[in-house]
Image: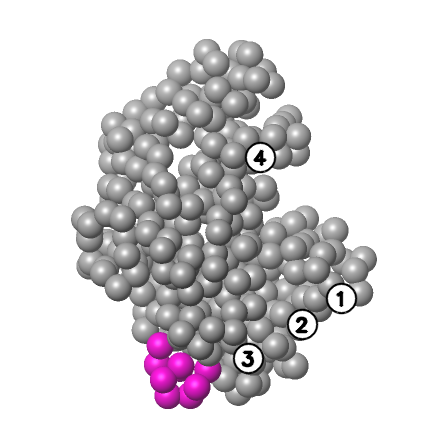
Amino acid sequence: MKILITGGAGFIGSNLCEYFLAKGNQVICLDNFSTGHRHNIEPFFANNQFTLIEGDIRNLEDCTAAVEGVDYVLHEAALGSVPRSINDPITTNDVNVSGFLNMLVASRDAKVKRFIYAASSSTYGDSESLPKVEDKIGNPLSPYAITKYVNELYANIFSNIYGLETIGLRYFNVFGRRQDPNGAYAAVIPKFVMQFMNYESPLINGDGNYSRDFTYIDNVIQMNERAILTQNSDAVNTVYNTAFGDRTTLNELVYMLRDKLSEFDSNIKDVEILYGPNRAGDIPHSLASIEKAKRLLEYNPEYSMEKGVKEAVNWYYKNLRK
């Protein structure tokens, strides 16, 4: 297959590039390196099945060039982070909505077989029902959440009007190897890991009882592959929760990380954990129902939170310890 992965130099995108190259596919990576990193994809440069296009999804010409002759698009490119979207809603909208629309138009015109895109659990907004089921959402709580919901609306329109096959994957707090621990908008797991390794106290927003369905990267890779391979006509032109189907509080998470890291460095077990105010736009609790994905895509996640944390901590300690 010839697969375009937008945002292919990012955390999820580079893992997808690596996986599909290993399977013998031709992989094109489109990235502008605004949040992705060249070092994530450098190991692939020697593979003649890999092509890097340095471009921006906000530029339709870049999108059109990238989709030429492509069978499947895995659209990962986006500006993540709820706080970033609150601080700069215009840029978040430009990338996540206008860029998304450019990719849909380019994919339609190139007659790609299927457009699979990164949706988000933030779409559930203020819905308090647990577990989260795909057809029951609430009101968005941030500009980021709005953009990801608009993506789903646009994808549905392109399926209905233009016949473009689309599948949206609502990611739930993905973590694992290559997730960037640096920067103002770093995800909580790599950020906490780096702080522990530097003997710095991690800061939890709130009392630590907020919970998340943390999802290891290999489960996400499996979902993307199932979305490509499915021949079930009922499985396309819809959205799926992409998660493990279990929830962990931030308190449970931070102590789990400290315990795992203490196996490498016993001094880490003495690092204090701090607490601060809740963060604007955060959903209190998140837990996915994965029954739809199991039924229609034959999804079978192999990595629990504990198994994923063990893998992730091993990778971070080996690759990022000073």
Residue position for label 4: 311
Q: Is residue 42 magenta?
A: no
Q: Does the residue at mark 3 contact the one at mark 4 (Cβ under 8 Å)? A: no
**Which element is circle 4 on?**
helix
Q: Main secondary structure of the magenta part?
A: helix
- Per the model, the C-alpha gap separating discs 3 and 4 is 34 Å
Question: Which quadrant of the figure contains the C terminus?
Answer: top right
Residue name at image x 60 percent, y 19 percent: 264
Along the line of sight, the residue nearer the viewer: 244 or 188 = 244
The span shown in magenta is 156-164
Residue name at image x 37 percent, y 46 percent: 245
**Dot 3 surroundings within 10 Å: few (below 14), some, or many (20 or more)?**
some
Residue position for label 3: 113
Q: Does the residue at mark 2 contact the one at mark 4 (Cβ under 8 Å)? A: no
Q: Which one is in front in this view, the residue at disc 1 or the one at disc 4?
A: 4
Residue position for label 1: 49
Residue name at image x 54 percent, y 55 percent: 222
Q: Is residue 157 magenta?
A: yes
- Per the model, the C-alpha gap separating discs 1 and 4 is 28 Å
Say which mark, if any, is on residue 319.
Answer: none
Q: Does the residue at mark 1 contact the one at mark 2 (Cβ under 8 Å)? A: no
Q: Is residue 217 left or right of residue 98?
A: right
| Amino acid under disc 2 | Met
Residue position for label 2: 1
| Amino acid under disc 4 | Glu
Q: Which quarter of the picture shows residue 247?
A: top left
* Residue 157, horizontal then vertical, whole percent: 35, 81
**Dot 1 surroundings within 10 Å: few (below 14), some, or many (20 or more)?**
some
